[in-house]
Amino acid sequence: MRLMSVRQCTKNVGVVALLLVTTLLVTTTAQAGDRWDWSEGSADGAGGATREFYNAAASLRWRHANGDWRDRNGDAQGKLPYAETAVASGKAELAVALDVTALVKAWLAGSVSNRGMLLQVGNGNGGTIRFASRENPQATLQPRLQLQFSDGQQTLAASADTHLDPSTYKAKGKTATLTISTGGHPALLQFDLAALQGRQNRLQKAELQLTAVERSGGTSKVQVFAVDIPVPMTLAPRLGLASQFVGDADIKRHPDVIYATGFDDSDFTDQWPEFRGHYWLTARGEQFAALRSNALQVRLEKGDNYGATGSLMFKPLIGAEPEQMYVRYYLRLGANWRPRSQGGKLPGFAGTYGKGGWGGRPNDGRNGWSARGAFLQQIGEGNPLAGRTPIGSYVYETGKSADFGAVWAWSEGEGAYLENNRWYCVEQFIKLNTPGQDNGELQAWLDGREVFHRSNLRLRLVPELKIEKFWFDIYHGGTMTSPTDQDLYFDNLVVARSYIGPMAESAARLSGHAGAAR
């Protein structure tokens, strides 16, 4: 790792440019139908549904292990299926048909969102059935939806299918069979009905046609339910102390603010011991403009791990080490940002004291802890969130990690899935636990909306461990170095004793997206 000189570019962009840039902080968000889904496109790939996640690449969890559904009455995890049929054991291939007219009509009418079908074996019934999947080499055995309209017939092939296997964390969407059995082992199928809109009044019958290629364990009652994705509501952004200061101007005057910088001058490092890495100050570039005069540009260079690192130590700053604190900064991923081989670290809080809680030194409750931010691998093609980068926390909890910390994606609410070339307001809150108790807190907001909250953390066993520093740590890996040059931009960093929130002018834009069901 090498120390780079700070390079300043054009300054004094001015308030007019600030207001123009902040109107670009929010672009249109993805609609429910193309974001909150369980399939990974035509690939049915490794980032699709598993027993734990309905979108594994984005760490979006089911409410219940092994899938969520609604029954014909609309009840979550209900017992009244849309269709069911008995299937006996046997060795020969068997055609299985289920009348799913009621479900398809509900999809076409819009009274039920088309998230697909969930097939399961009814409680107390039978054994295991393996149906041919859409990946089965024999096309005649693959699932299909036979539709009878008043003016003709139409057959649809499944657009995605998989099964949720409680014995593995891996997605099973590429297998040639769909396995269902008792004990939380359902299958999911989805059919694209977009071309059928407006024809619901002509639909007379919809039949799901499957081929059972293996049956064992006695007669099984196959049941069909509607997949239920836990889609959140879009809430208004939470405003904080920053709403009192246009563009964060003079925000340092607020009594709760202990540090603030817009990265406008090179002297921002004066209070950061050994701030080093591949960084400089820049005002604008291709597809980029700072929020004010300059922004901090950090580069993960090809073949290197470090982008930049520096520690804002609390004791020299305020005379003591606190037990709770907020930090907010604006983050923009550059046009060349593509973390496809491994994730890495982002800024966060820590109390490592040079002893433990980072770098493969487990937190034993007495040596140290950390709760840095994290970025995950960019989501691949075919996923509803393709091209976005999930961010979250990388935490060394007491006694919870073998050698390294745990990564928790910020996937609550609307989640934190960042596009390239867009400013985001990122805020974190940490509250240390009472020594020996599991009552520590970690909370995060993206653009003023909560995306993560844990209130059962154990970060220490002794009161001597406190919040030693805000750790500005940009790092690729893990162990793998960056495969290409990748740039991140930071602006308007504030550390405070109370919630900070988005800047006033960006919050007004964010509020324009509030209130719509997702």
Image (tube, rainbow, N blue to C red):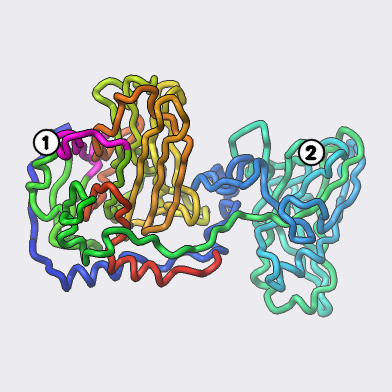
Label 2: how many Cα within 10 Å (few below 14, some 14–19, many 20+): many
Query: Is residue 421 among what the camera can see?
Result: no
Give 124 or 133, whichever is nearer the viewer. 124
- Amino acid at pointer 1: Leu
- Please say whether residue 497 is visible from this viewpoint: yes
Name the amino acid type tagged 2. Answer: Ser
Q: Quadrant of residue 128?
A: top right
- Is 314 in the magenta? yes
Q: Earlier in the sequence, mark 1 or mark 2?
A: 1
What's the CA distance linking mark 1 and mark 2? 59 Å
What's the residue at 65%, 59% (across, down)? 115
Give the percent coordinates (x, y) of residue 435. Answer: 40, 26
* Quarter holding residue 201: bottom right
Rendered image: mark on residue 3: 1
Q: Can you say whether 283 is above or below 379 in the image?
A: below
On the image, numbered disc 2 is attached to which residue? 181
Give the image location of residue 499, x and y in percent.
32, 52
The magenta stretch is 299-323
